[in-house]
Amino acid sequence: MPRYLIYVIAVGSFAVAALSAIILWPAADPQDAVERIQSYQAKMPPPVSETVTVTPSVVELVAAIKSGTAVTAPILVYHKVVEDKPKSVYDVTVTAFETQMRFLHDNGYAVISLTDFVAATSGAKVLPPKAVVITLDDGWENQYANAAPILEKYGYNATFFVFTNPIGRDKRFMTWDQLRDLLDRGMTIGCHSKTHPFLHKVKDEKTMAAEVSGSKTALERELGVIVDLFAYPFGVTSPEEEAAVKAAGYRAARAFPGGVNNSDETVFHLQSVSATEDMRRFAAIFRQPEPVVAPPDDSPNGN
Ligand SMILES: [Zn+2]
C-alpha cells in the first residue's frame, strides 16, 4: 500500500472519530441524566403515608401565621406514567393515573394550576375548597402519550417540568412539538434545568446560569411563552440554587417532597407530595385536618 494512502486513511479515521465524538458528545448527556434519575430514585426510601400527612414544622407555622397566607393544597408530583408495572415506586401505571384523576373528580377536588397556587401564597388569589395541584417531572414521552389525554378528559391543568437537553434528541422524552401541543391543550410548561444535574453541587456560576437561566431562555424561545416556574432537579434545594432561580426571573420554584404546607415563605422551595401507585396512600394525601370553624351565633341548636 502506498505510504500516502496509509497517511490518508490514518488522518481520515482520526477525522471521523473526532467528528463522531463531537456529534455524539451532546447526545451522551441525556443518557447520563436518565441514569442519574433512576439511580437516585432507586436509592431514595419509598414514600410512606406518614410523610404525607405531615404537620407543619414550627418554622413553617410561625412563617404562615406571620404572613397569614398558609396554603395547604397538595402539590402532587408524578414521574413516568407507564403501561406496564413501573420499575420505580415514583412511577405509576396509566391505570393508576386514571384512577387517581377519577378519584379527584368524583370526590369534588378542584384541580388548580401551579400559577394560581403561587398567586394564592401572596394573597392575590383565593383557592377554592379542596384545591390540588398536579405536576409531572422530567418531560418523559409517556407523560405525553398516557397522562395528557386523561388530564384533558377531566379538564385538568398540569405543569410539566421538563429539562431541555433531551428534548427532540432522545425518544424517551417529549419533542418541542409535543410540548407546544400540551400548551395548546391548556397545560403549563415549567423548567427543570438543562441537564438534570445535582444543582446543589454546582459551584461555578456559569454552569448554574446555564442550568437555571439558559434552559428558561431555550424553553421560552422554542415555545413562545413565558416560563416562570422552576422545579429543582431531584427536588434538592440549596441557598445558591434559590438565589440563581430568583436571579433568573422565576416566580416560584418547587422542591420535592416535603408535604402539603406552603406559604409565601416557601415560594422558592414549595413543598410537594409524591404520587405513587398506592391508592390508599393517595387518598391519605387529602385527609388533612379540618380547619376549625366557629359555629355561627344564630345556629338553631348550637352546632
Ligand atoms: Zn427530575
Image (tube, rainbow, N blue to C red):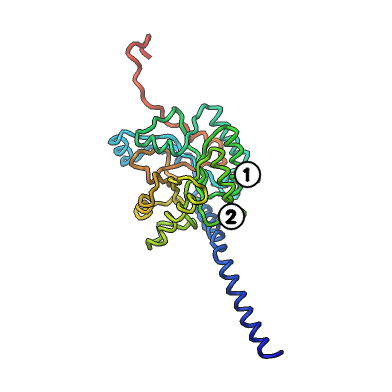
Which numbered marker is on residue 145?
Answer: 1
Depth check: 69 or 212 in front? 212
Depth check: 189 or 220 in front? 220
Q: CA distance from mark 2 to mark 1?
A: 15 Å
Q: Quadrant of the N terminus?
A: bottom right
> Can you say whether 167 is above or below 4 in the image?
above
Q: Residue type at mark 1?
A: Ala
Residue found at x 50% / y 39%: 134
Which numbered marker is on residue 175?
Answer: none
The x and y percentages for residue 155 are 56, 32
> Can you say whether 286 is above or below 275 in the image?
above
Residue found at x 62% / y 74%: 16
Depth check: 129 or 174 in front? 174
Q: Quadrant of the C terminus?
A: top left
Q: How dense is the environment of label 1, judged by Cα within 10 Å: few (below 14), some, or many (20 and up)?
A: some
Side of 57 relative to 20 (left or right)? left
Q: Residue type at mark 2?
A: Gly
Label 2 sits on a secondary structure element that is: loop
Residue found at the far left of this picture: 66
Q: Which residue is mark 2?
A: 168
The x and y percentages for residue 196 are 49, 56
Label 1 sits on a secondary structure element that is: helix
The x and y percentages for residue 222 are 52, 51
The x and y percentages for residue 177 are 59, 48
Residue found at x 42% / y 57%: 199
Viewer-side label of 2, 1? 2
